[in-house]
């Protein structure tokens, strides 16, 4: 916590258009993002979530409260409505992810949306898509190699299997399962926004191949939405002179606007959901507080991600932040949830983690070029 306050104090003390923030702040922000993204659903891991819509709404309440605290801490800088779009995109992708998980399972779904998320976020910054200024690195070949290895590492982790979970088969089974055991064949990949990667294997009826294709398409769309979340805030930071004269280089100045977009879009979707359910939504009271805590942790992680993007550039931060949480989640799965064991799994984890370490080293060595 002291480290987080140090970063907040360092960033908030800078002038609005400061451009040369020390790189160590960016890398510390990456570490904070990785730790909290990899752990944010642990508080809710053993509680039932129903169909997930109520859980997501209360989680978004926690996210918005975190954004409010950060906004007060940075003395309420200018609110840019454009950044709301980033929050709306995240919420829409998260709603899609709940549907996709029930079609294709968590493992394949997250492999698709997290890989797409990383590639969209990395490429939009590196190549200057959507009106952004291209973010160059000193050694592009190392950056490309790191991103490629990061994609491969996600595929390696798909081979992990856990001890089969015993689940009561009832008419309302999918409304009673905990959040970390709510889908058939689950395997681990990476995530930035989102669900913790816990692994399990549960027998399920076969799903029509066409429905699986639809699920893959929706997972890819969700990944695109996740990858576009930072485009509005980065666009504003890239155009401080011609369009946004008061734009700040401090990523924390865009937190509240983004989190407001998340909260209000989540509220809209939740109202639609309640109407669809005839005012009888699935709400498990015991999961409300854990959902809020999860949202607070996610909010801290996303704030770190925003700072990392501002300091290091998306070409560096996106691959690092999207590959890290999976390793943290696996550690939770081994030592807390006791779901991963066995020599085979440990060898796979060791190999996948080694690939991710190599990827991270290559990306760091590619070195961002300050703008």
Image (cartoon, rainbow, N blue to C red):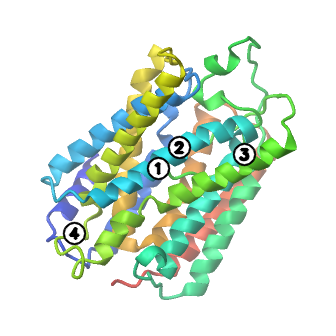
Q: Alpha carbon of mark 2 to alpha carbon of mark 1: how far? A: 6 Å
Q: Say if residue 49 shows up in the picture.
A: yes
Q: Alpha carbon of mark 2 to alpha carbon of mark 3: how far? A: 14 Å
Disc 2, SS: helix
* Comes first in the chain, label 4 or label 2: 2
Q: Residue 359 location in percent, x, y?
A: 61, 69
Residue at (58, 51) in percent of width and height: 222
Q: Which dot, 1 or 4, sits closer to the camera?
A: 1
Task: Tell me the crowding category of disc 4: few under 14, some 14 to 19, or many 20 or more residues within 10 angstroms, Cα based.
Answer: many
User: Which of the image's four quarters has the N terminus?
Assistant: top left
The residue under label 4 is 248
The residue under label 1 is 90
Q: Residue 74 location in percent, x, y?
A: 17, 54
Q: Alpha carbon of mark 4 to alpha carbon of mark 3: how far? A: 39 Å
Q: Relative to the observer, which residue lies in front, 4 or 158?
A: 158
Q: Which dot, 4 or 3, sits closer to the camera?
A: 3
Q: Which mark is residue 115?
A: none
Disc 4, SS: loop
- Position of 335 compared to 347: left or right? left
Query: Which of the 4 image quarters holds residue 314?
Result: bottom left
Q: Which mark is residue 94?
A: 2
Residues at circles 3 and 1 in contact by the CB criterion of under 8 Å: no
- Position of 225 compared to 271: left or right? right
Q: Which dot, 4 or 2, sits closer to the camera?
A: 2
Residues at circles 2 and 1 in contact by the CB criterion of under 8 Å: yes
Q: Residue 138 location in percent, x, y?
A: 48, 88
Q: Relative to the observer, which residue lies in front, 328 or 74?
A: 74
* Comes first in the chain, label 3 or label 1: 1
* Comes first in the chain, label 1 or label 4: 1
């Amino acid at each position: 916590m002291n480290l987080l306050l140090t970063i907040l104090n360092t960033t908030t003390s800078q002038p609005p258009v400061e451009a040369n923030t020390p790189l160590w702040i960016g890398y510390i922000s990456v570490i904070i993002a990785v730790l909290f993204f990899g752990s944010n659903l642990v508080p809710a891991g053993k509680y039932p979530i129903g169909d997930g819509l109520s859980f997501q709404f209360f989680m978004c309440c926690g996210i918005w409260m975190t954004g409010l605290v950060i906004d007060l801490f940075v003395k309420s800088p200018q609110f840019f409505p454009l950044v709301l779009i980033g929050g709306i995109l995240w919420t829409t992708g998260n709603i899609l992810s709940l549907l996709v998980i029930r079609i294709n399972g968590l493992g394949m779904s997250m492999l698709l949306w997290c890989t797409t998320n990383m590639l969209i976020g990395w490429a939009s910054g590196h190549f200057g898509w959507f009106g952004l200024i291209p973010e160059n690195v000193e050694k592009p070949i190392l950056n490309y190699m790191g991103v490629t290895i990061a994609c491969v590492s996600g595929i390696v982790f798909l081979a992990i299997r856990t001890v089969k979970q015993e689940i009561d088969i009832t008419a309302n089974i999918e409304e009673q399962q905990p959040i970390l055991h709510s889908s058939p064949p689950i395997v681990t990949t990476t995530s930035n926004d989102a669900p913790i990667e816990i692994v399990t294997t549960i027998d399920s009826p076969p799903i029509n191949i066409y429905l699986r294709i639809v699920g893959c398409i929706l997972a890819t769309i969700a990944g695109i939405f996740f990858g576009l979340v930072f485009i509005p805030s980065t666009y504003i930071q890239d155009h401080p002179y011609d369009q946004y004269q008061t734009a700040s280089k401090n990523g924390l100045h865009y937190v509240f606007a983004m989190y407001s977009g998340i909260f209000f879009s989540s509220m809209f979707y939740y109202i639609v959901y309640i109407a669809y359910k005839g005012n009888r939504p699935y709400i498990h009271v015991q999961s409300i507080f854990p959902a809020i805590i999860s949202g607070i942790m996610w909010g801290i992680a996303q704030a770190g991600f925003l700072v990392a993007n501002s300091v290091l550039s998306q070409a560096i931060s996106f691959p690092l932040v999207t590959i890290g949480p999976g390793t943290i989640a696996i550690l939770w799965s081994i030592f807390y949830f006791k779901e991963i064991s066995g020599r085979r799994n440990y060898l796979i984890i060791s190999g996948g983690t080694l690939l991710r370490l190599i990827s991270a080293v290559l990306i760091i060595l590619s070195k961002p070029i300050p703008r």
